[in-house]
């Protein structure tokens, strides 16, 4: 069975999907972790996060395992996944990876008192998260809480600078190899032309410097991590979404829309709402309208009194029969 973690040979575990309820139980992950017999656990992460309590359980289990924990963020460690990453004695991030921290959030239903109680619980969870991040980074609680409140996205270098990572490595570049002499003449000519260095302007960076990922590449990485690959090209090319922060807002809205559609059992609506660029309030209104349209009309008017009590009424009785019986009684008297 494919799961959001996979134990590899030796001492490696991967977390590459949502954490907790959307994937598998914490127990299943811990069973795999406890099966590692060595003194080191190499944990690779590429996850948008998930259940905060599942993240806390995995973090605590790693910290109390007595083993050396080496964490590598492959693409993104967001939300609860960033919390798990804090368990690492070493936290390594390739230079094109990202990390995100934010306040805990939840859905709540009920009256005003129940909603206030839910908010109080979220505040307590937020305090717990802030303490964990502060302990790992050495930052003060107030500074961490401000970062959580702002939903802070960090590049690898920013995470290193702020204490959320211990090492930044060069981005991995995939390369293909082939036998040039097996290509047709025209293809060899095109290849040779492509290998000719283009003229560099005077203020251009040295040719041996690693190129920075493009906007489209960054969008693709984030969309893949959040399970929203189908919309990556749309968001990357939309001029109304000019920067990565705006794309992240779109992704967050898309996740909320998918969650709302799931709660309403209208999952089929999510794709259309996301592709049409609906905001969360607009999507909520559309979902409510769809629910109202789906409701069957129920007639709550009471039935006629005589119909409700028909069973208690005598049947086949006529007024003339009553008078005839009385006349007969009088004659007999």
Image (cartoon, grey):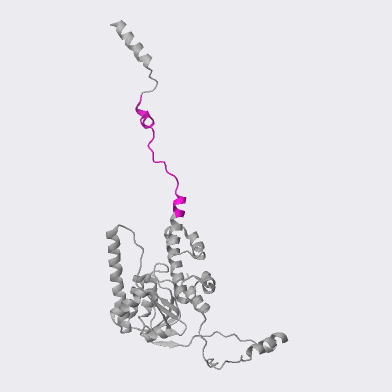
Magenta highlight range: 289-313
**Residue 289 found in image quarter:** bottom left
Q: Residue 221: x percent and y percent?
A: 49, 77
**Residue 180 found in image quarter:** bottom right
Q: In the rendered image, is residue 265 in sight?
A: no
92 up-or-down from 101: above or below = below
101 up-or-down from 187: above or below = above
Q: Residue 320: x percent and y percent?
A: 38, 14
Question: Which of 111/332 is in front?
Answer: 111
Magenta highlight on residue 294: yes
Question: Which of 39/293 is in front?
Answer: 293
Q: In the rendered image, is residue 116 in sight?
A: yes
198 up-or-down from 149: above or below = below
Task: Name the residue at the right extreme.
Answer: 185
Q: How many marks?
A: 0
Magenta highlight on residue 292: yes
**Residue 76 found in image quarter:** bottom left
Q: Residue at x 54, y 73 (%)?
A: 237
Q: Residue 150: x percent and y percent?
A: 36, 75
Q: Residue at x 45, y 88 (%)?
A: 169
Question: The C terminus appears in which quarter of the rendering?
Answer: top left
Q: Residue 205: x percent and y percent?
A: 52, 91
Q: Residue at x 28, y 70 (%)?
A: 124
């Amino acid at each position: 069975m494919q799961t959001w973690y996979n134990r590899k040979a030796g001492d490696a575990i991967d977390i590459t999907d949502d954490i907790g309820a959307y994937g598998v139980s914490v127990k299943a992950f811990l069973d795999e972790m406890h099966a590692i017999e060595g003194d080191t656990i190499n944990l690779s992460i590429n996850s948008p996060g998930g259940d905060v309590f599942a993240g806390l359980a995995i973090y605590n289990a790693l910290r109390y395992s007595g083993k050396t924990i080496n964490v590598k963020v492959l693409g993104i460690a967001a939300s609860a996944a960033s919390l798990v990453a804090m368990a690492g004695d070493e936290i390594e991030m390739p230079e094109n990876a990202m990390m995100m921290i934010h306040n805990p959030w939840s859905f709540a239903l009920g009256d005003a008192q129940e909603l206030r109680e839910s908010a109080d619980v979220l505040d307590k969870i937020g305090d717990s998260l802030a303490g964990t991040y502060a302990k790992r980074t050495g930052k003060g609680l107030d500074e961490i809480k401000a970062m959580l409140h702002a939903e802070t996205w960090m590049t690898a270098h920013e995470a290193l600078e702020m204490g959320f990572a211990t090492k930044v490595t060069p981005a991995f570049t995939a390369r293909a190899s082939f036998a040039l002499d097996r290509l047709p003449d025209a293809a060899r000519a095109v290849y040779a032309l492509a290998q000719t260095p283009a003229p560099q302007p005077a203020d251009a960076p040295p040719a041996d410097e690693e190129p920075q990922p493009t906007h489209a590449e960054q969008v693709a990485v984030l969309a893949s991590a959040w399970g929203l690959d189908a919309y990556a090209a749309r968001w990357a090319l939309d001029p109304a979404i000019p920067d990565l922060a705006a794309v992240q807002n779109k992704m967050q809205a898309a996740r909320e829309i998918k969650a709302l559609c799931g709660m309403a059992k209208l999952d089929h609506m999510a794709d259309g709402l996301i592709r049409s660029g609906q905001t969360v309030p607009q999507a909520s209104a559309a979902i409510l309208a769809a629910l109202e349209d789906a409701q069957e009309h129920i007639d709550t008017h009471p039935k006629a009194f005589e119909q409700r009590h028909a069973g208690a009424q005598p049947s086949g009785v006529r007024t003339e029969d009553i008078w005839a019986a009385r006349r007969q009684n009088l004659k007999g008297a």
